[in-house]
Amino acid sequence: MEDLELLPSTRRALKHRIAVAQREGRAPSLVAAVVRGGAVVWEGARSMVEGHGPDGNVQYRIGSITKTFTAVLVLRLRDKGLLELGDPIEKFLPGTGVGEVTVGQLLSHTSGLAAETPGEWWERTAGTLRPELSDVLGERPFRFEPGRRHHYSNPGYTLLGSLVEAVRGKPWEDVLRAEVLEPLGLERTSAQPVAPHAGGWAVHPWADVMMPEPLEDLGLMAPAGQLWSTTGDLAKFAAFLVRGDERVLNAGSVREMRTSATPPEPGIAELGYGLGTQLTRSGGRLLAGHSGSLPGFLAGLWLSEADDVAAVVLANCTSGLPVSTLAAELVGIVAEAEPWIPEPWRPLREADPVALDLCGPWYWGTSAQAVRLTHDGFLELGPVGGSGRSARFRAEPDGSWTGLAGYYAGESLRAVRRPDGSVSHLDLGSFVFTREPYDPQAPVPGGVDPQGWRGIG
């Protein structure tokens, strides 16, 4: 394993970036951490108080990063067989008036529900003003037909929190602590502030003065934005979102969270939304994570799976500091200054003769493709010497292979054999791949001209 310690020049670049951000953003305080290889490799802080800054143990409110925690709980219920993403919410919360909306639509913000609650702004008022789901949803809960487009919805995540409570028979906060926070060792993440914690401030937009923001208990809206946490805890959470943890969610399920489930909302810079995670691109790299804000607080968490780097930034001001952008930039500083040195190439421990039989050139019509068997036992299929569809495939017990990403995700690749056992062709979702272009000995859809290949004359 490569040494995780960052170079002095990289550490200074990180320190300089947060110092500029805190000064230009006029934040009373800012605390940040960078995770690499699953471990914290850098921490930094800036504060208006000379000689004193917060550390990784000081709580800040994290706003909508709470939604990612709620999504983890819902996917745990799915993985335990207690629900399906296609289940209508009516199955668990009857009588809401939005029962046709599915669990998956709520997770991905494609439910069509309103972005906010009716009445007074929920982030600055007590949750007691909205004691029932009907108060959260209002008389006109929908803005769009369910499933038609991405539209961010805070009430949607309130429904998911209530779903967790209905299935588990316990308050959302209690379930979160028992099933996520305690297993991951997130001892400083809580629904209510626990000292030491920062106070939330509003900084005047045109003068260097400030005033405290109210700290409200959000009640039913808690699953959408209630949590307090630290950079220390969120660093652990970011590492979990990369690798998974069998005690909470396995690697496949957290990968599903980071996979786009919707196209981006029009006018929004994000690439789309997964299941409880936002997706964006910064400096040419794909990032997954979430931003968060509540009056008095800003938060950002982004991770780059390809670089195995994540960053967390927390600040105690209502606006003015682009925390989410800053977190993405911290990822970029480390990834660009100190790219991972790849592990040495190693061969397979044991070659699968069936898989080896599939390796080499194939033709989809006249398009030259190649199949490779990699050291981890997966098949790779992609075009030869050009761009086009490519994918990795996982072996299945029945001898087929399942696509893992891109156009072929979930599609089945099968080797069709002749009576003598030799491979006639590959079948990939009805596409026929042959050893020769339009091989007349293979069942090419539409047939092959009996005169074969010929010149102009």
Image (cartoon, helix red, strand yellow):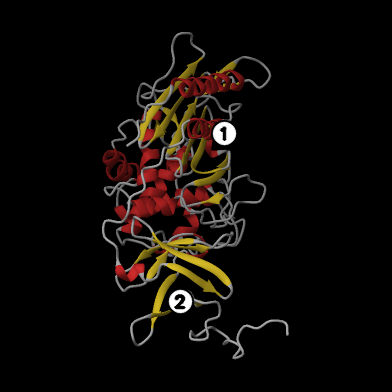
* Residue placed furthest toward the bottom: 450
Kind of residue at badge 1: Thr
Separation of marks 1 and 2 at Cα, in angstroms: 44 Å
Instruction: Please give the name of the residue rendered at 38% of the width and 31% of the height, measured from the top-left corner.
Output: 192
Quadrant assignment, res 208: top right
- Whole-percent x and y of residue 284? 58, 42
Q: Quadrant of residue 388?
A: bottom right
Which label sits on residue 137? Answer: none
Question: Label 1: which residue?
Answer: 325
Residue at the outermost front position: 457
Q: Residue furthest right?
A: 457
Disc 2 secondary structure class: strand
Q: Earlier in the sequence, mark 1 or mark 2?
A: 1
Q: Is residue 255 above or below residue 297?
A: below
Quadrant of the drawing holding the N terminus:
top left
Are there few (<14), some (14-19), or many (20+) residues within 10 Å of tag 1? some
Residue, disc 2: 427
Q: Is residue 78 above or below residue 430?
A: above
Horizontal side of 299 relative to 20 (left or right) equals left
Count neighbours of disc 2 (C-alpha within 10 A) and say few if under 14, some if 14 to 19, many if 20 or more: some
Q: Residue at x 48, y 47 (%)?
A: 277
* Number of callouts: 2
Looking at the rendered structure, the secondary structure element under dot 1 is helix
Q: Residue type at mark 2?
A: Asp
- Give the quarter of the image for residue 457: bottom right
Residue 170: give x, y in percent of width and height: 30, 48
Residue 396 in view: yes
Where residue 113 appears, as percent x and y from the top left, is 56, 54
What's the residue at 44%, 15% (across, down)? Answer: 53
Q: Nearer the viewer, residue 423 or 179?
A: 423
